């Protein structure tokens, strides 16, 4: 069974701190995606990671991919309140854009 | 950038009625669109893949006769929830792949979602 596991599922942290969200998946996948969702809203694409060792950064967010370990991380540096949201990772094991999603990590950043 | 719209953004209907949700790609052609549902505080579940000009392919456990999908043009896919019941209440999100991507060939673009409440 294909599984995508995120942890933690809930994270409350103070502004200015660093933290990492982990995404493990159970099958090979050429692509891994990170999305952000605000309450009641749709998905905002953050990163698409396509190869082993890929690292992408945008502002305070940095994502990496280790295809051998089947692990991706989303690192938050010096968190700010505006980053509060739910973050999802998703994989595309058959390379057909039919994504398998993690459960999401709800991130709350307190001022 | 690529924009996907959904209509309506929210709808309340009575049990037993049918509801149609539209998904449009506004500035690109989409030969493939996807329909997801999301329960409160849960992840997304792929329901079906909608292909322009052909029948949709449904994920295991999704009732084809209940969730009718039509992809009649390169910019429009519709999801009709037939004989809706309270358990069909959910957030329905569509996404679309650009048939001719100039940038970001691995992306799919998500609509804003439709919140369906069946009373």
Image (cartoon, grey):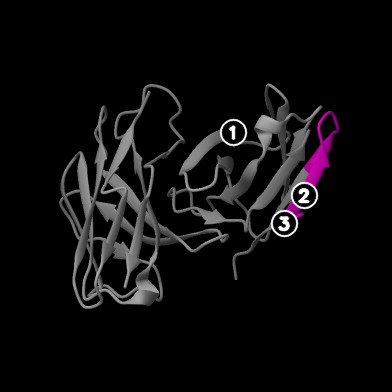
Residue A9 found in image quarter: bottom right
Please say if the residues under marks 1 and 2 sit with CB atoms less than 8 Å apart.
Answer: no
Q: Residue at x 48, y 48 (%)?
A: A40
Q: Are marks 3 and 2 on the same chain?
A: yes
- Residue under label 2: A11
Give the residues in magenta.
A7-20
Is A61 rendered above or below residue B61?
above
- Residue under label 3: A9
Left or right for A20, reference A2: right
Q: Residue at x 26, y 29 (%)?
A: B28
Q: Assign a secondary structure to mark 1.
A: strand
* Residue projecting furthest to the right: A17
Q: Nearer the viewer, residue B94 or B20?
A: B20
Task: Evaluate whether residue B10 shows in this view.
Answer: yes
Q: Assign a secondary structure to mark 3.
A: loop
Q: Earlier in the sequence, mark 1 or mark 2?
A: 2
């Amino acid at each position: 069974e294909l599984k995508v596991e995120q942890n933690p599922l809930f994270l409350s942290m103070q502004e200015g701190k660093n933290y990492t969200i982990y995404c493990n998946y159970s099958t090979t996948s050429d692509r891994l995606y990170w999305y952000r969702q605000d309450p009641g809203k749709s998905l905002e694409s953050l990163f698409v990671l396509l190869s082993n060792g890929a690292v992408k950064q945008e502002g305070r967010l940095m994502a990496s991919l280790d295809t051998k370990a089947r692990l991706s991380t989303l690192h938050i540096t010096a968190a700010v309140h505006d980053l509060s949201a739910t973050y999802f990772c998703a994989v595309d094991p058959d390379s057909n854009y039919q994504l398998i999603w993690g459960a999401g990590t709800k991130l709350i950043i307190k001022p | 950038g690529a924009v996907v719209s959904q209509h309506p953004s929210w709808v309340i209907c009575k049990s037993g009625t049918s509801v149609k949700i539209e998904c449009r790609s506004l500035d690109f052609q989409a030969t493939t669109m996807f329909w997801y549902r999301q329960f409160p505080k849960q992840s997304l579940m792929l329901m079906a893949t909608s292909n322009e000009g052909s029948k949709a392919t449904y994920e295991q456990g999704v009732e084809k006769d209940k969730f009718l999908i039509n992809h009649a043009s390169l910019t429009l896919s519709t999801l009709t929830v037939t004989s809706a019941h309270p358990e069909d209440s959910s957030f329905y999100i569509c996404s679309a792949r650009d048939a001719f991507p100039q940038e970001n060939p691995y992306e799919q673009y998500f609509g804003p979602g439709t919140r369906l409440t069946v009373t």
